[in-house]
Amino acid sequence: MTLNIIFVILYFIFAPLLGGLFAGLDRVVSARMQGRVGPPVFQPFYDVFKLLGKQNFTVNRFHSYYLVCYLLFAVLNGAQLYLACLFNADDILFVIFTLTLADIFLVMAAYSAGSPYSFIGAERELFQMLVAEPLLLITAFGFYMATKSFDVVKIYSADHMLFLSLPGIFIGFVFVLTIKFRKSPFDLATSHHAHQELVKGLTTEFSGPTLALFEIAHWFEVVMLLGIVFLFFASSPLLGLIITVLTYFATILIDNTYARFKLHLTFEVAWIATLILGGGNLMVLYFLKLVNG
Amino acid sequence: MAFFKKSPWIIHYDGSSCNGCDIEVLACLTPLYDVERFGVVNTGNPKHADIFLITGAVNSQNVDVIKNIYSQIPEPKAVIAIGICAVSGNIFRDCYNIIGGIDKVIPVDVYVPGCAARPEAIIDGVVQALGVLEKKYSDLKSGKLNENKQALV
Ligand code: SF4
């Protein structure tokens, strides 16, 4: 029991801390890639604390309420993955569904504002979810094919490295990661950088504390998604950690070297990747199962 | 709270400048000056901003735009007039459509003169504005300043 409480406390301390640090590293590494010095690593924390001290402009009664729900489900989402040992047989499918639900609340918050920027941003976010969803589900199915279980704990303690049986799905997942992180070339709904044609898209109408909630929830999301990357290599934790960090670095590199894709290109590229990498991997696994009986 | 000092987010609006000052403002973001070292972000969205940078004088066309942007920035906020056009109207002050410096329509906290204002001067102006932000924040806390008191638009 006490061990469980310690786990919960550790999760609540380290998940946002890691998320914020990753965001800070992102900004520093991006700046270095552009030949600049960049902000301090702790800049995202300064930003969030500042935002919490600002005045809150809410455009209607439900605005902050939706964002609180987004944060709650993002926190629950990470908990499902990292505190899986506390839940009785926690399902990786639930993790993916909760991620979707959290994002839906974010979209509702953006829709509830009258601003056309936030409205179009919300539409694009829905579109990005549609594009990313199939591969997230295929990832869960792939874990099931490889370990005969949807249970996160069983997947974590699989006897072989899951990457070896799911290489296609892994590459596809990294692909989808850039969509979920809202990084270039898929920063359609909102972008980390200042200027784009939609001002700030999805987050245009969030100000002060509401924007801080959004940032914190996003940290939780990033940490959760990187956790799934780690699951592919869970049988050798050190390699897993290295690959997770490298994956994050790769998304930053892609962020800095690609221009934004159009909606249709996003859709085509992502679904073709899903079909070939994800679907192909599942099919190979299925045939191997048939052959091996 | 020292956090306002560490993460000033900026929105930049070009009144009716000759673009000289705008180029200098953008130069602050380039690798040479790199204001992101101090946590400065150029947001482009008034609802996320703390500091309002204006270059160029106010004219009768953009006076509503300036008031609108100003009223959409959440408190505490600071306004910086960049370049002598924004300070007083400069050589354009006698034009038929020019109203004058920015302080004719909204309260200005920091004046950065120069034609064009140099990036070093602009960064210095931003640093001065940080002090203003801190003061406004403590005024807000102690109730001396009311939230969203603008009845401009
Ligand atoms: S101050 Fe000089 S450089 Fe700046 S906008 Fe006016 S005329 Fe142009």
Image: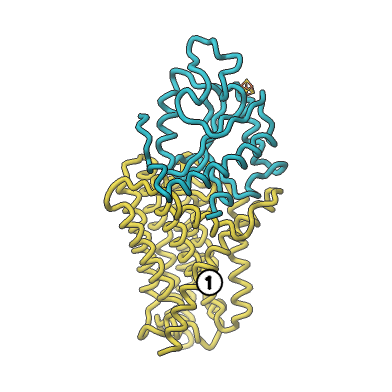
| Snapshot quadrant of residue A43 | bottom right
Residue at 47% x, 22% y: name it.
B104
For residue B56, above or below residue B1: above
| Quarter the C terminus of chain A occupies | bottom left
Chain of the residue where label 1 is placed in the rendered structure: A
Residue at 35% x, 53% y: name it.
A107
Find numbered disc 1 in the image and state the secondary structure of the residue it sits on.
helix
Q: Residue B127: where, in percent of width, then height?
A: 62, 42
Chain A as rendered: colour:
yellow
Note whether residue A207 is visible: no
| Snapshot quadrant of residue A247 | bottom right
Q: Residue B13: where, in percent of width, then height?
A: 52, 31
- What chain is the cyan one? B
- In the rendered structure, the answer to whether residue A26 lies left or right of residue A115 reads right
Residue at 52% x, 50% y: name it.
A192
Taking the image as four quarters, which one is ligand 1 found in? top right
> Which amino acid does the dot numbered 1 rest on?
Val
Note whether residue B13 is visible: yes
For residue A258, above or below residue A45: above
Residue tagged by mark 1? A229
